Amino acid sequence: MQNDILFILKGLGLTINLYILTMVFSLPLGVLLSLGRLKNKGILNNVILFYTSLFRGTPLLLQLFFVYYGLPMLLGLRFTPFTAAVVTFVINYAAYFCEIFRGSILGIEQGQYEAAKVLGMSYWQTMRRIIIPQSLITALPPLSNEAISLIKDTSLVSAIGMAEILRNSRELVTRDFSVVPFIICAVLYLLMSVVVIAFFKKLEEKVMI
C-alpha cells in the first residue's frame, strides 16, 4: 500500500506545477484582456470577444487535444505534453478571468472615474491606482470558484499521457482491481481544494479589513 501511495504522489508534483503555472500566467493575461475589451470598442474588442467566446464555449479537453495533436498537423508546432497542457490551460482560464475582471471593473461606480479625472489622473493611472485594486477585491469570490475548478480540470491532462495523480491511480486500479487508489486520489483532490479555499478565505478577510 505504501508503494501505491508513493506512486500516486509522484503525479502530485506535476498536478501542482500545472496548477501554479496556469494561475501565474492566466491571471495577469485575464486582466490585460479585460482592459483591452473595456478601453477599445473597435477591432481589438471584437478579437478579444471572439477569443473569450471560443475558449469559454468549447470543451477544455477538446482545446487540449487541438494544441497537442492538432497544431503539429496544421502548423508543425510540436509541444511536450506538459507544455501543451500549460498553454491550453493558460489561454482557457485567461478567457474566464477576462470576463470576471471585466464584470468587476464595470461594477465600479462611475464617480470613481470622475474623481480621478478631477485629480488629473490619466485613464491608465486611474485603472492602475484606483479601479483595478478595487475590482480585484470584488473579483475574489468568482476567482476562488475558478481556482477550485482548475484543480479538478488538471485531471484532463491524463488524456494526453501525462502521469498526474488520476492517471497513476487508474493504472493501480487496473492492475490490482481495487478502488482504493481512486479513494486516495479523491482525498488528494479534496485536500488541494481545501487549501485553495482556505487561501482565498484568508485573502478575502485580509482585504476586507
Image (tube, rainbow, N blue to C red):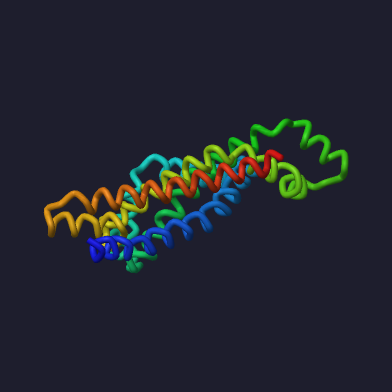
The one of 73 and 96 positioned closer to us in this rendering: 96
90 lies above or below 194: below
Q: Residue at x 26, y 63 (%)?
A: 2
* Foreground pick, 108 / 149: 149
- 23 vs 38, nearest the viewer: 23
Can the viewer see residue 123 in this picture? yes
Residue 169 placement (x, y as % from top left): 24, 56
Q: Where is residue 3 in the image (x, y as percent from the top left)?
A: 24, 66
Seen at 21% across and 55% down, the residue is 170
User: Among all residues in the image, which is located at the extreme right?
Assistant: 119
Count of marks overlaid on the render: 0
| Rendered position, 46 above or below 28 | above
Q: Which residue is drawn at 44% across and 45% down?
A: 148
Quadrant where the C terminus lies?
top right
Q: In which quarter of the image is residue 87?
A: bottom left
- Measuring 48% from the left and 40% from the top, which residue is drawn there? 145
In which quadrant will I find the N terminus? bottom left
* Quarter of image, res 165: bottom left
| Horizontal and vertical percent position of residue 95 | 48, 46
Q: In this view, does 50 lie to the left or right of 58?
A: right
Can residue 51 be seen by looking at this rendering? no
- Expressed as whole percent of the image width and height from the top left, the position of residue 54 reads 41, 44
